Image (spheres, rainbow, N blue to C red):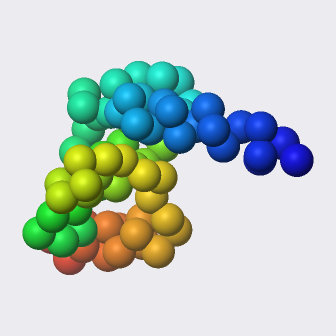
Amino acid sequence: MIKSIIKPFQEVLLERKLCVGCTHPLDKAKKLGNLSSNRFMVECKCRRRYVYDKEMGSYQRATFAEEQQMLRDLSKRG
């Protein structure tokens, strides 16, 4: 029930490119790296991670699998 109340607010915040936790602009978030040619991951100042899709021009919360992929890529570079 709580999810059905919160989800519309989170969708509006993401449409406006704002973090759902702290409402910080995601355009100013720290870019972590590319997941593919048209998708990259950013991290907000509150440590939430999002994936930006260049084709759609929108953000979504990063899934656990996407976060693990990014960690593997970062460890290969280091």
Residue, x 11% and y 69% (percent of image)?
A: 37
In the displayed structure, does residue 20 sit left or right of residue 71?
right
Q: Residue 23 versus residue 67: which sits nearer the camera?
A: 23
User: Where is residue 2 drawn, in percent x and y?
Assistant: 84, 42
Work out whether residue 78 can be spotted. no
Q: Is residue 40 above or below residue 76?
A: above
User: Where is residue 23 drawn, in percent x and y?
Assistant: 48, 23
Count of numbered tags: 0
Q: Is residue 2 above or below residue 74?
A: above
Work out whether residue 16 can be spotted. yes
In the displayed structure, does residue 29 sit left or right of residue 5?
left
Q: Residue furthest right?
A: 1
Image quadrant where residue 44 sits: top left
Q: Is residue 19 above or below residue 62?
A: above
User: Where is residue 25 drawn, in percent x and y?
Assistant: 34, 25
Residue, x 52% and y 24% (percent of image)?
A: 22
User: Where is residue 50 drawn, in percent x and y?
Assistant: 39, 50
Residue, x 45% and y 58% (percent of image)?
A: 62
Image quadrant where residue 6 sits: top right
Q: Is residue 56 above or below residue 45?
A: below
Point out the image quarter for the C terminus: bottom left
Q: Residue 8 versus residue 27: which sits nearer the camera?
A: 8
Q: Residue 71 versus residue 24: which sits nearer the camera?
A: 24
